[in-house]
Image (cartoon, rainbow, N blue to C red):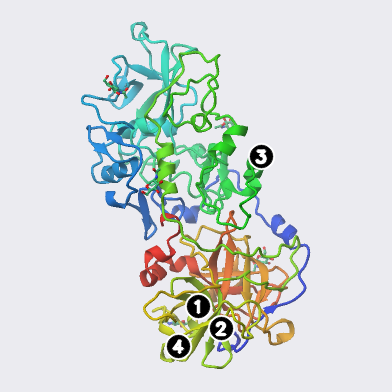
Amino acid sequence: MKVLLVFLVFSCPFFCICGLQGRASEEEELVQQVQPVQQETYLIKECLNNKYTHNSCKKIFCHPWQRCVGGNCICKLPYQCPRNGTLVCSSSGRAFRNYCQLKTYECQHPQEKFLNKANCMPAEKFEISLDYADSQSEGLIQVKLVNHTEKLFMCNNEWSMNEANVVCTHLGFKTGAEHHKKKFEVPESALTSSQCLHATCRGLETSLMECSLIKRSNINSNQNFASVVCHKEDDRECSQFHCVNKKCIPLTETCNGINDCGDLSDELCCKECKNNSFHCNSDVCISNKYLCNGEADCLAGEDESQARCGALREQKPNPEIPEQDVVIPNSDTDEALCEQKPNPEIPEQTVVIPNSNTDEALCEQKPNPEIPEQDVVIPNSDTDEERRKIKSQLPLLKCGVTNHRITRQKRIIGGNTAGKGEFPWQVAIREGSGSVNCGGIYIGGCWILTAAHCVRQSRVNQYRIWTGIIDTIAYNQEIDTFKLKQVIIHENYNASSYQNDIALLEMKSNDKGKPCSLAYSIPACVPWSEYLFRSGHQCKVSGWGLADGYTKQFVLRWGNIHLFPNCSDIYEERFFKGMECAGTFDGSIDSCKGDSGGPLVCMDSNNVAYVWGIVSWGENCGVKGYPGVYTKVASFFDWITHHVGRSLISQYNV
Ligand SMILES: *[C@@H]1O[C@H](CO)[C@@H](O)[C@H](O)[C@H]1NC(C)=O
Ligand SMILES: *[C@@H]1O[C@H](CO)[C@@H](O)[C@H](O)[C@H]1NC(C)=O
Ligand SMILES: *[C@@H]1O[C@H](CO)[C@@H](O)[C@H](O)[C@H]1NC(C)=O
Ligand SMILES: *[C@@H]1O[C@H](CO)[C@@H](O)[C@H](O)[C@H]1NC(C)=O
Ligand SMILES: *[C@@H]1O[C@H](CO)[C@@H](O)[C@H](O)[C@H]1NC(C)=O
């Protein structure tokens, strides 16, 4: 077995995408293969062992005032925030240029919370108290808004753990709420106001003022106000769901799109999601409220995909933007959305205060003359729009987007010939003037990613990188060739097991003193999380390897293949962490001898290409049941950033 393995990958002079006939039924097979869900639990045990929380950027996007370092969201420093924005005031009366600067400051001074979006005025205060209970950690919630003298109860309808957790966090209970439904008696004398305050929170706010707040007339039963029991840290036994922050919540409350734990740990390892929530490919449940809201919540953006939200957006197509252009996630689709869909959280009769930032305000909806005056949006609360603004100002990498659309075919017929510019990240590695050794992937700057088994440090002067190759390896004017400055092979590369089969090549700029300029190349994005794509996802492999019948290949070929779920069953002790396997179930498309070092790219919902794998090894080319094995690039994100620098490849602030 081993001998065969080495034979396959060792110094292959040519490339192939094996097999020219695909099977029409591949996609159907894949659908059937989805496993039935165990009804008693929605949770994935192995995933829970990783103790993911709202700070785990392998699972979720960090807040825009944070960045992702080594898998954790870490606060930026205030100077790393955008400079302009809306002035905000903190709870201690300190003014900040914008919300981002306040949040970065809060990271270091947790008592300093958001108060409102305005110039700070002396003696402005926002107070929350828990009343009508025996214990100080529970009760009916009463709020005294800025400049108000009377206390308001919170409305009970749509009151969830998201809001309860924010109230408790606001009051200094680190792990948030224990319950949000306990009943407390209100004395008749306390019922002085006919209004209550309705809150909608995302669940990770630290101040209730960061939520959207609406004063409503309390038409329902007077007794029906929101209450909370805050969680006191303890070490009780937990027979239900043990949150990472040690809270114990009912199993029934996991995987429902609501942040019951307060640290989100009940929503991050889900096979499936309960009603009113959406399952991201990363096994995270998000509330249905966040679908098609113009802001990506799932890592690969599937909550905002064209397929899902297209109907909503079709109304307002922009004919000038071709589809293959960069789609900026989090860009403002509010206008398109609000024309179709009234915001479910804000009843139609709500009075919109100018400068508040509800969707309606964005749409410049004309006020409805029939609106009763008693429903009032509290201006200067609700930081949702500020958060989006910061996101929109984050630097955006230009990667993974081709100028040429890859020819679409409904059914995959294996091994297509690549067209001009369809795989602009594909490069070839030649040794001297000899033949092509291997493929490689351009990831930006002067950097090429390839397999460790393709290169040797001692031959750094012999290698030439060919970029801008259009379809054949025959010379043409778009081709640039580069010499190498250095070869970096992974320090734990094992040439007999193919573990850590990854290397970086730094090219020498052709133009002395200037950065590498690659006129016909576009970098592929580098994935930062192993959860970006999951087994079953269809990806594309490309190369010049041996074709069917092991014939030489001078034309760049590509094929659609799927990520396999069961590589360690197939290859047993030869399959290690940091490897991925992919192919077609009938073996009709595969990478082969000579494709080594080349890219396996997967597309996210915006059709942005990520280099998910590097062609590494395989049992044989195009044999049923033996998919090709790839170096799983996401597992090496930190290794890559260490060598090439974070800013070159850090998509979305990671
Ligand atoms: C922030 O400042 C930049 C550069 O000064 C400017 O281009 C941008 O439009 C400003 N953004 C806002 C929201 O004012
Ligand atoms: C509170 O009152 C002061 C003084 O009247 C006013 O300037 C300020 O804007 C008010 N703040 C809010 C949030 O209404
Ligand atoms: C989800 O569905 C169950 C059963 O259909 C129902 O009892 C429960 O109230 C629902 N949960 C929510 C949050 O709607
Ligand atoms: C390399 O892999 C082989 C085969 O799995 C193993 O026997 C050997 O111990 C590994 N070498 C190192 C340095 O890990
Ligand atoms: C791996 O999964 C594929 C697709 O579900 C299946 O056809 C194949 O039999 C599996 N192989 C093993 C060894 O489990």
SS at circle 4: loop
For marks 4 and 3, the one nearer the N-term is: 3
Quadrant in the picture for the C terminus: bottom left
For marks 4 and 2, the one nearer the N-term is: 2
Q: Residues within 10 Å of mark 1 (few under 14, many from 20)?
A: many
For marks 2 and 3, the one nearer the N-term is: 3
**Which mark is on residue 450?**
1
**Which mark is on residue 522?**
none
| 65 up-or-down from 566: above or below | above
Tell me if the residue at label 4 has its CB under 8 Å from ligand 4. no
In-front residue for pair 430/370: 370
* Residue plotted at (67% across, 84% down): 554
SS at circle 1: strand
| 349 up-or-down from 430: above or below | above
Q: Is there a contact, CB below 8 Å, between mark 2 and mark 3?
A: no
* Residue plotted at (37% across, 12% down): 186
Q: Nearer the viewer, mark 4 or mark 3?
A: 3
Residue tagged 3: 315
